[in-house]
Image (cartoon, helix red, strand yellow):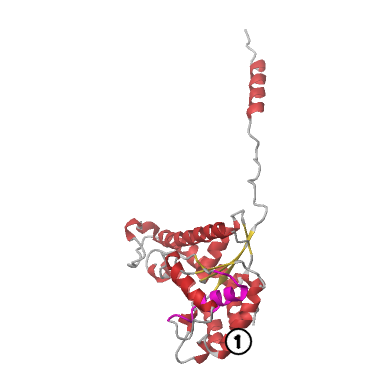
Amino acid sequence: MRLSFAPGLLALAGILGCTRLPATGPLPATPQQLTNIMLVACPHLSQLRKADKPTSDVLTPPRQAELEALLSRLQRFRPDVITVEELPEEQARIDSLYALYRQDKLNLSTLPGGRSEVYQLGFALGKRLGLARIYCVNSEGGTSQSILHEGQNIKLYEEATAAHRAYYAPVVQQWESGAVSMSGLLYFLNSRPMLEQLHTLVYRTPARVTDGTLKTDPMVDASFVKPHYVGAEFISVLYNRDLKIYSNIVTTQLATGGTRLLTIIGGRHVASLQGILRTDPAYRVVPATTYLKKK
């Protein structure tokens, strides 16, 4: 006797039809008001100064005039929160210095580290905008890119490092000579080709390096490093810091309710943080070059 499975199959299909999840679920709800964030890649201005090149000193009158022009351009972004590359543990010190700065009682030319972008850009822009505080969002974990120094395919990393230096060194040299302004320097450092090249050098190329070791570094716990994945381990050290900076940024936004954040930070972090923030539905990333001038 032939058994017929048709009725059972139809019943099963009916049940599955009633319980089947949609092929694509609804998109997560997004905030009604996105937080605009602009990450400004900035060199450590104190480190750019060279004794034999007076124009490399940001405290000289010509450079101060250029900084004023640069600040006017950044001010157009209208940030209501400014964050800088200082550790949260330094917040009380930064608060104290900023309070003095707002009262014109802080002389940056005599302050140790007074050439820093924290003061020359962060403090100066915050005072212009009447902001009560400059927020610290840095994280420990920074380390030199040179700790990745050996392994299979290390030549790829060395060649990429040399190519990157050859790309940016001429512009820095022009800035040192006075041929490039402060705004022009920052425009170059925030340009898409520069950010992408640096990001590839630091977060992509090292993954091709295997079977090696990292140089001893007090900021790196080498006990977890697997030699075969030495390049990927190196990337993880740097990316871990970026994730913590991202956490500091978003928790600062939650605490302040800011809707237009401006973060002044080293260029190595910018493309990485932009990538993280672009996948955060609460944020809209604004390129710094929108407000900077090429020359």
Specify start and end residues of the magenta stretch as a single range: 112-132
> Is there any visible trace of residue 130 in the rendered image?
yes
Q: Quadrant of the C terminus?
A: bottom right
Q: Picture coordinates of residue 156 (x, y %)?
A: 46, 68
Residue 151 is situated, as x and y percent measured from the top left of the image, at 38, 64
**Residue at left 66%, top 42%?**
26
The question of residue 114 being in magenta is answered with yes
Image x and y of residue 199, in percent: 53, 66
Task: From the viewer's side, name the closer residue of 172 and 34.
Answer: 34
Quadrant in which the N terminus is drawn: top right
Give residue 290's quadrant in the image.
bottom right
Q: Is residue 279 left or right of residue 244?
A: right
What element does badge 1 sit on? helix
Task: Say if 117 sits above or below 236 in the image.
Answer: below
Q: Is residue 181 at least partly visible in the picture? A: no
Residue 182 lies in what quarter of the image?
A: bottom right
On whether residue 158 falls in the magenta region, the answer is no
Q: Quadrant of residue 12?
A: top right
* Up-down relation of residue 167 to residue 21 (above or below): below
Question: Residue placed at 51% from the left, 71% from the top?
Answer: 266
- Neighbor class of circle 1 (other Cα within 10 Å; few <14, some 14-19, many 20+) is some
Q: Relative to residue 5, is residue 93 depicted above or below? A: below
Asked whether, in this view, residue 67 is left or right of residue 233, the answer is right
Main SS, magenta region, reads helix
| 34 w.r.t. 132: above or below | above
Residue found at the very far top of the displayed protein: 1
Return the residue at label 1.
65
